[in-house]
Amino acid sequence: MTVITKEAPPRVEGRTFDPETIRSDFPILSREVHGKPLVYLDNAATSQKPAVVIEALENYYRELNSNVHRGVHLLSQKATDAYEGARETLRAFINARSLAEVIYVRGTTEAINLVASTYGRRNVGEGDEVVITAMEHHSNIVPWQLLCEDKGARLRVAPMDDTGTLQLPELEKLLGPRTRLLSLGHVSNALGTINPLRQIIDMAHDRNIPVMVDGAQAVPHLAVDVQALDCDFYAFSSHKLYGPTGIGVLYGKEALLKEMPPYQGGGDMILSVSFEKTTYNALPYRFEAGTPNIADAIAFGKAVEYFQEQMASGLLEYEEQLLDYATEQVGALPGVRIIGTACEKVGVVSFVLDCAHPHDIGTIVDQEGVAIRTGHHCAQPVMERFQIPATARASFGMYNTRADVDALVRSLHKVIEVFG
Ligand code: C6P
């Protein structure tokens, strides 16, 4: 039996999620493209930003700009408070035990590279194995390939079936005495599959194998509680969660982080430096060398607060219904094949049409003002598994409506008229 962690956080009574009100919080949604109203359905690539996030960025540079953890002057103290306050917002958001477990990084990609180059370099040796799955984004493949090449270790890949569902018995068979880490996505960006993390993590922990989770596509659509999941590492990016680019989080269990060597050397990650010996700062700063991305971290905190408000109003249920509607409408098109039909899905509808290459689909719907992503979605092995070069992918955010889905479907009828 597959157990899915798709819990919604508690709803605040009397509040109803209203996408129309939400839309007015996102300035970019009122612009036109090619003379048509923008229909933005590329949220898995990056989401749009609400005014509160844009204002937080502007406010930082107008009112607070200063370096953190360094100055005794007022601005530096205020900037430090705002920067560390955002860390607390992020800690509470994923329910990490302590601030020491919340490391600021550039995004999911850097988080995975950090774990590969520190935890991986220390714990993976010749003949050892790292296990991933067949539905990973390149960010959760290449860092492990680099590590395995360097160490003479082996990368093993758990397969998925034709619906894009991970084959758990096959995964279980791969978890052996030489497995040093399992790293997998919570949600697939190319297929939308939600992996049953709790069950998988228990399976790995029964064999003393730590688990790293790529949460880039999960955090914008699911309630994530790292303690309930009991994952060892969890990575996510701000820019897919209505926050700015260039900032993200690596969560790690403190006991593991403490034993890991530093990632990069430089300012802020040290306690003392001499030419003979350097001692390192406490967590999380030990992994945050150099002047950090202060403004974006603060705005990320604002994005999370905004997102949490919408979750408390029923956002996640709304998104589920919208995805069902989109799947039904797109699935009814002539000559369409939906790629990724797992029972538990979130966020995306990936598809191909008999009559047109995905790039042509993307170009024609763009002329109608509809932004979708086409290509391999940085998941080339997924395309190979389904024996297709690419897909067209519509991906949803909190401001999308049934009218957006209808606009997509109308534009796809144009594609079929031209190529069919
Ligand atoms: N996927 C997409 O269009 P960064 O770039 O570090 O913020 O996130 C990388 C990443 C890692 N894992 C998953 C599952 C992802 O989906 C992504 C980013 C985007 O699907 C851009 S390729």
Image: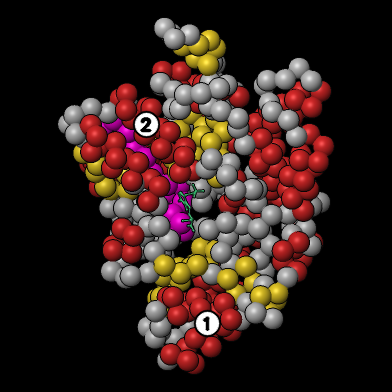
Question: Does 257 sit left or right of 369 as displayed?
Answer: left
* Residue furthest out toward the front: 275
Mark 2 residue type: Ser
Q: Is residue 107 left or right of residue 207?
A: right
| Residue position for label 1 | 364
Percent position (x, y) of residue 270?
Answer: 53, 16
Q: Is residue 43 visible?
A: yes
Q: Looking at the image, which is closer to me, 26 or 278?
A: 278
Give the numbered dot on residue 74.
none
- In the picture, measured across the screen, residue 316 lies left or right of residue 235, that is right
Answer with the quarter of the image where residue 338 lies: bottom left
The residue segment tinted magenta is: 175-196
Residue at 24% x, 34% y is 150
Circle 2 packing at 10 Å, graded few (<14), some (14-19), many (20+), is: many
Q: Which residue is mark 2?
A: 117
Residue 191, how many percent across, how many down? 43, 61
Res. 131 image quadrant: top left
In the displayed structure, 297 sits above or below 387; it is above
190 in magenta: yes
At x 75% / y 25%, what residue is drawn?
76
Q: Where residue 92 sits: x, y (%)?
A: 65, 32
Mark 2 CB within 8 Å of ligand 1: no
Q: Residue at x 67, y 72 (%)?
A: 38
Q: Amino acid at mark 1?
A: Ile
The x and y percentages for residue 169 are: 27, 46
Choose between 242 and 401: the one closer to the eye: 242
Q: Is residue 118 left or right of residue 267?
A: left
Question: What is the secondary structure assignment of the residue under circle 2?
Answer: helix
Distance, label 2 to label 1, CA atoms, is 42 Å
Answer above or below: position of 245 versus 113: below
Secondary element under disc 1, as helix, strand or loop, is helix
Q: Residue at x 57, y 56 (%)?
A: 46
